[in-house]
């Protein structure tokens, strides 16, 4: 059956292709919107219709709500899928879609807004009985207040911008003296980046792991988890490798974490797919970090261990249909790993836009790529050109397959992080599953 | 000293003359600058790179406008 007649995809690159693929399988027509820089991109060709929504800079195209809504009206789309990034977690966009008569494939605008405000989200989850990292739960009004709180919690602490994200607007602080300096500079930076200089602080977690739980809720009140993803292989808060399940959690810890995620999402009446992000310390204590109210870049590893098509579930939920809970296996099926390929130097991390002269990929692995041979990687958007996903009966098998897959990749014309990915797969700490979020920066970059 | 020197873009991307939309420009034409001073930013793949002056001088003119799309080695500013 078809949930919608025609869906407009307000995104680009690999996630636009991913959404188009599921829509095609379900006989849903697709509309791509694209910037002038993306006119030759694969997702534009693969959609049934495509509308140019402006020049390369995102403000004038992928973030331009008027142009996107106009494209939806012109093409007769009935629903809008925001993908991830861009307008996916913009409450005003969700509201606008609904007001203009389109189904927004995501949660309500009020839920997006609530989870988008980091302080409000923490308070909400704390009220639902989910541990949060010890800290102050309101905006700090002065450096004196910050110092009092820091001394109560105990240094080191992390100073954070309320409106921050992606690692911007965060600072580790070890003493009162450091806090005096950091308070002003972080507030200043937050003000200029986000237009909001509200700060809060929390305990700094040692040996942290980033583990997130995939949850899914429908409009009839069904709310379930699809287990966790381990996302600790990252650099500057940008994820590089993800896997499911997490090698760090034993069955009891897994059950507790997933139950907490469901409880938190239920407390806000969550509908759509969503991700509850947690930080887990060396002792296995977990704390709520934030919630992402959209499909995640790393959703394929969850699909691999569950057999669920998360994009289809998003469409189904948005159409008001119940989830088919029988589709979910009783336990995670095997192990899956995802590697993100970035157009950047593997050592210096300098972005490397340009023409992809060669792109040979192992066709036996799951591939989610934005580009093909001969395409240009433009300087305007994310450096991620694609993802390779493997699945095995065991973690060892998934790793072995990923090593083979990476070895078989041939990329030329642009610099890329293949060497870094290969060295992660070869690393004893990665293979033993004993890494934390500092792994890439401390063990691999010398 | 009338010799002019061009500052070229180190990367392809978008050129900005100010640190953020609500801030003033880094420098104006006619300003004296020292080696290491920032004259603009290049945004490439969601990262920002500072464009710095390599020698002391005076800003002669900008070859591109704020928020222009620039190519690698494209002239951004001339110094005199």
Image (tube, rainbow, N blue to C red):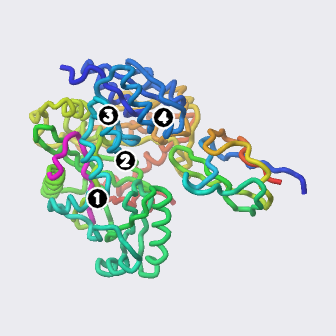
Task: Name the residue beneath numbered marker 2.
Answer: A241
Contact? badges 2 and 3 (CB < 8 Å): no
> Magenta segment, principal secondary structure?
strand
State which tag comes first along the sequence, 2 or 3: 3
Q: What is the C-alpha distance between the residues marked 1 and 3? A: 28 Å
State which tag comes first along the sequence, 2 or 1: 2
Please tell me whether mark 4 or mark 1 is closer to you in this view. Answer: 4
Q: Which mark is residue A61?
A: 4
In which quadrant will I find the N terminus of chain A? top left
- The residue lying furthest to the right in this view is B1
Magenta-drawn segment: A267-281
Task: Name the residue beneath numbered marker 3.
Answer: A97
A51 or A361, which lies in front?
Answer: A51
Q: What is the C-alpha distance between the residues marked 4 and 1? A: 31 Å
Q: Residue at x 14, y 57 (%)?
A: A256
Magenta span has A270?
yes
Task: Kindly tell me whether residue B22 is visible in this rendering.
Answer: yes
Please tell me whether mark 4 or mark 2 is closer to you in this view. Answer: 4
């Amino acid at each position: 059956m078809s949930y919608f007649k025609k869906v407009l995809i307000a995104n680009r690159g690999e996630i636009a292709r991913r959404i188009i693929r599921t829509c095609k399988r379900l006989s849903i027509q697709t509309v791509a919107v694209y910037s002038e820089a993306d006119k030759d991109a694969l997702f534009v060709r693969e959609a049934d219709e495509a509308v140019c929504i402006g020049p390369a800079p995102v403000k004038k195209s992928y973030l331009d709500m008027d142009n996107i809504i106009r494209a939806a009206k012109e093409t007769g789309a009935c629903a809008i899928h925001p993908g991830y990034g861009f307008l996916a977690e913009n409450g005003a966009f969700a509201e606008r879609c609904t007001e203009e008569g389109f189904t927004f494939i995501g949660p309500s605008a009020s839920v997006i807004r609530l989870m988008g405000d980091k302080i409000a989200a923490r308070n909400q989850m704390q009220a639902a009985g989910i541990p949060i990292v010890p800290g102050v739960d309101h905006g700090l009004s002065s450096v004196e207040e910050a110092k009092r709180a820091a001394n109560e919690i105990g240094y080191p602490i992390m100073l954070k911008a309320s409106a921050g994200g992606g690692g911007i607007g965060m600072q580790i602080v070890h003493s009162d003296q450091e806090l005096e300096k950091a308070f002003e500079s972080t507030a200043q930076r937050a003000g200029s980046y986000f237009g909001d200089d509200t700060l809060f602080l929390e305990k700094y977690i040692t040996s942290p792991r980033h583990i997130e739980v995939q949850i899914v809720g429908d409009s009839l009140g069904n709310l379930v988890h699809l287990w966790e993803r381990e996302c600790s292989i990252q650099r500057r808060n940008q994820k590089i490798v993800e896997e499911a399940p997490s090698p760090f959690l034993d069955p009891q810890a897994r059950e507790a974490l997933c139950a907490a995620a469901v409880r938190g999402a239920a407390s806000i009446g969550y509908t759509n797919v969503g991700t509850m992000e947690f930080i887990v310390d060396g002792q296995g204590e977990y704390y709520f970090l934030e919630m992402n109210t959209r499909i995640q870049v790393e959703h394929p590893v969850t699909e691999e261990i569950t057999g669920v098509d998360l994009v289809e579930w998003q469409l189904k939920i948005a159409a008001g249909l119940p989830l088919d809970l029988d589709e979910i296996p009783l336990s995670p099926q095997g192990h899956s790993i995802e590697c993100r390929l970035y157009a950047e130097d593997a050592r210096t991390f300098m972005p490397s836009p340009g023409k992809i002269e060669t792109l040979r990929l192992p066709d036996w692995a799951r591939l989610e790529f934005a580009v093909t041979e001969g395409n240009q990687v433009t300087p305007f958007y994310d450096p991620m050109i694609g993802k390779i996903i493997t699945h095995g009966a065991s973690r060892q098998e998934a790793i072995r397959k990923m090593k083979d897959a990476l070895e078989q990749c041939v990329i030329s014309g642009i610099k890329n992080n293949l060497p870094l990915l290969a060295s992660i797969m070869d690393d004893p700490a990665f293979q033993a599953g004993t890494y934390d979020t500092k792994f890439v920066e401390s063990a691999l970059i010398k | 000293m009338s010799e002019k020197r061009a500052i070229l873009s180190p990367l392809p991307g978008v050129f900005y003359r100010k640190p953020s939309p609500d801030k003033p420009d880094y420098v104006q034409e006619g300003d004296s600058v020292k080696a290491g001073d920032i004259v603009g930013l290049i945004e490439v793949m969601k990262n920002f790179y500072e464009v710095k002056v390599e020698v002391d001088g005076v800003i002669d003119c900008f070859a591109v406008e704020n928020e222009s799309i620039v190519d690698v080695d494209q002239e951004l500013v001339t110094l005199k």
